[in-house]
Image (spheres, rainbow, N blue to C red):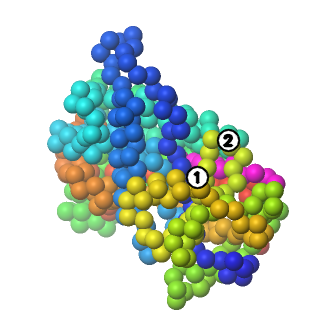
Amino acid sequence: MTDDEIEPKVAIHDTSPKHKDDLIQGTTKAEDEIFPTLAEKDKLLAEWLEIAVAVYNNQVTPKNAENTIICVPQLITTLEFFAQTASETPQRNIKNILYHSTSSSLANKKNLLANFLMDWERNIATYAKPGNFCTQRRLLVNHGFTKSYSLDTFTTFNMLGIEVKILFNEGSDIIRWFKNGCKMKQYPETLGNPINLWPKRNDSTALEKHRETNNCKCPIFVAVSHFEFPFKSCAFDNAKLYQISFRPSPSEKIQVLAFRITCTKLMPLRFNQIAPKCRIIELPSVAEHLSMYIIENCDEIAIQNGNELKQYILSMKNAQVDNEIESLYIPSFFGYPKTTLNIAQSFANALKEVDILFQPGSFNDLAFELAEPSITFKPASSIQHYNHFELMKLPEFTK
């Protein structure tokens, strides 16, 4: 590879639990507590990887000129939240997607996955040090349509770490929440509120106003994550950013910013050739239990499912070493995401059984009477994710 033309790459980071004894098996002080066995945990993780890849593939389109970042723990926690709080049919469908391979006693257990999911996030935060991994979740409620919740709903809020926030305006509170709750130190001050909230339009027709009102009766579930990957400082050029040529397609060539990783004989490039024009490459992490890979020319292999992705990552156990390459340039495309990710649309498209969640009344106890959940930003999507991935020691860009 040369400095003036670098082939496309896609960043992938592994967020699955590393140790199988993260959960305690057997009984606890509450005799009726049930936990997944190790075999059931493996099945759950395999199924969730399939869900994540399906949702990711649905989000990535040629017209999507944004960084597409999927946080798998947030994805599964969102589904688990509605598996416990939605109306009967959506609950049943989502539970079947999340853990249909487990025993019937597990599938019928209230808040089965809450402890597992919370441990998962804590483990990632621990493994990421000296980097950072933070997640926050809120249920945003329109101030004109507040309501009381059942004890079961409050229990689910508590177990999954979800705040309930009554929203009176769309001012700086959400931005402060991002910066403080998720430790986003370099969040651009000029960026407005990226969460798509209920619209306020004066030119709406009577039918549109009726729809907008019913949409306001439904809360917006927002999950936010921030992952800061800890690079080895000796391998990372933290003094400069570079401008390189990048080909998003064979017929198109654009200029993008990139950062440089230095390869040496003591710390050579590790890779595995997975197709004639495609390699999976390991990036140097300072964290002992954290690995990060990029896939070069990933369109050449068109990963269709989670098992394919898993096998490519596992192939790095037999990685080759290239002592000839001295520099690796990684494109840095769009910086902080400017808009929230409409994960509801991808749920409905990629997981057909979840489509029924976006029908009037499906949010059940979460929503005001006659609420209409939406999967689109017209008027407002009822489930949204905002994820940011950054690199430690990345130099600031100045013109």
Q: Would you name the residue on which mark 1 appears?
A: 317
- Residue 157 coordinates in the image, percent (x, y): 38, 31
Side of 134 relative to 34 (left or right) = right
86 is higher (above) or lower (below) than 64: above
- Residue 181 coordinates in the image, percent (x, y): 58, 40
- Residue 201 coordinates in the image, percent (x, y): 35, 62
Q: Amino acid at mark 1?
A: Lys
Q: Secondary structure at mark 2?
A: loop
- Residue 96 coordinates in the image, percent (x, y): 24, 42
Please rate how many residues cluster around mark 2, counting C-alpha atoms within 10 Å: few if below 14, some from 14 to 19, many from 20: few
Residue range highlighted in magenta: 225-234
Side of 197 relative to 364 (left or right) = right
Is 293 or 98 nearer to us in this picture? 293
Residue that appears at 69% across and 62% down:
321
- Residue 288 — which label? 2
Task: State which quarter of the image contains the C terminus.
Answer: bottom right
Residue 280 visible within the image: yes
